[in-house]
Image (cartoon, rainbow, N blue to C red):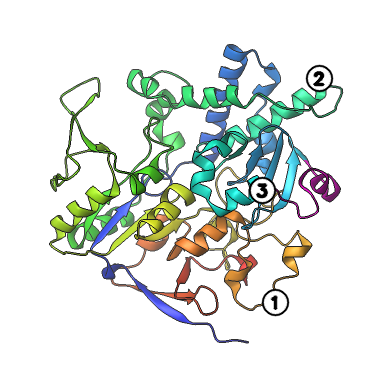
Amino acid sequence: MATVGRSIFRLRHYDCVGFDMDHTLCRYRLGAVFEMEYQALAKYLIEQKGYDVRLRRPLAEDVDFLHKGLVMDVELGNFVKLSAKGQVLRASHGTKPMTTAEITSQYGPLRSNEFLRQMAADPIEATEGPLHRKYRPFKDYFDLPAALMCARIVDLLDYTNGNKPLEKYTFWRDVLCGLVEMFSRDNLKLNIGGYYPKIKRHPELYLQPCGERLKKWLTELKKEKVTFLISGSDPEYVHKKPGFFSGERPFQRWNYTNSSGVEDEEMQLDEVLPANSKTIYLRGNWTQLKSSMSWCCGVDHPKFLFFGDHLIQDVLAADVSRLDVVAMVEELAAESHPQKGPPIDGLASYKRWGSFFYDGGFTEINNRQTTVDPFEKMNTLWSNLVRKHARLCVAYIETISDYPSNHEFVTIQNGQNSDKFLGFLPSLPTCLL
């Protein structure tokens, strides 16, 4: 067996450490959130758009359909699991699994097309540009219930069409409007709708409590490092976090004294952000924040580390902007060996879609596994982003906060002749062993 290179990952190596909020510092009870989101979306579609009342069926009846990273072929009503090269590893039409013959009849013998290859080659452009209207990836847990909603709509449309697929499906805009309405900023301010009031009224039903060890770890980290929080939670900004790292949008200070929550005082692009722990800034850009972090820690070229769960908006975008990244991937808890974490709350086993990290169902890809390098097996679109752009892949923030800040984590050489190293906590997923 070939020798695998190893390296050490140290938190103390970094001057500034940043965090995403949702699904990183703040963890959700996914099962409850999925059901709540799904029913809010169903209510909107039935009452506002006239959809079939059968969409109200409990999400739990098809929980095995949920798989982060599925891509919807909007016009064909298909849902595909993609490889790192844009090939269809598995697929379903609506909720019905597609056979190999059905996949190749629609995507060719190589199980791909130019649009899927484009999505794999440039995920940021593909998910923000025109291609997004044709192929819609469900990239995180907030929009995952919408994937099942879309699949069930396809099933109902096919049923009313004599159990035959339509030539073209046009419902996606209605579902998108439902998502926009559910997470709208007005609903947040007015405390209305099917999402925010329930979260506020019963947070214990939807949010995981933050443990004392994590609080202590964050407190100690803040004493040693400059820390910052970057969140795309605001609906007007949630799809534009890649723009934060690559663009030049000016910051705005949040006006605490304004009860309506209106932002004001737009800052100049060359202005330093004061190191005031009670100040919240909206919009903005990484270049300006980076300069301010340098000023705060008194280092000309500080080293940055960022924790985030969104593999495009956090992991890919941050790495392109030259931050080291810890990828938060909850699926690792269910796939690690030995299994040191519980299965993901709200998600069933991987019998339907297979592993998040690897899929050997496509023979052509499977036959190419001739190396002993475990990372070569990370052949799904999303696990490949982890492989290429993260330093650590961690199931939960608590997994790393269990260790002192001076702990040395062993990482493995990420491919032969590579200068990149990657580590997993709590351990490698079983599919990579």
Amino acid on which the number 2 mark rests in the picture: Thr
Element class at badge 1? loop
Q: Residue at x 48, y 47 (%)?
A: 124
Q: Label 3 crowding class (10 Å Cα cut-off): few <14, some 14-19, many 20+?
A: few
Specify the farthest residue to the front: 114
Residues shaded magenta: 97-113
Amino acid on which the number 3 mark rests in the picture: Glu
Alpha carbon separation for disc pair 2 and 1: 48 Å
Element class at badge 2? helix
Residue 368: x and y, percent?
A: 72, 70
State the residue position of label 1: 370
Asked if residue 285 is positioned above or below residue 397 in the image, the reply reads above
Residue 101: x and y, percent?
A: 86, 48
Q: Is residue 141 visible?
A: no
Q: Is residue 95 visible?
A: yes
State the residue position of label 2: 160
Alpha carbon separation for disc pair 3 and 1: 27 Å
Amino acid on which the number 1 mark rests in the picture: Thr
Q: Viewer-proximal residue, 340 or 39?
A: 39
Q: Label 1 crowding class (10 Å Cα cut-off): few <14, some 14-19, many 20+?
A: few
Q: Viewer-proximal residue, 196 or 266?
A: 266
Residue 7: x and y, percent?
A: 41, 78
Q: Is residue 110 magenta?
A: yes
Q: Residue at x 63, y 67 (%)?
A: 377
State the residue position of label 3: 114
Q: Describe residue 389's horizontal placement relative to residue 50 as left or right.
A: left
Q: Label 2 crowding class (10 Å Cα cut-off): few <14, some 14-19, many 20+?
A: few
Q: Residue at x 78, y 63 (%)?
A: 363
Alpha carbon separation for disc pair 2 and 3: 32 Å
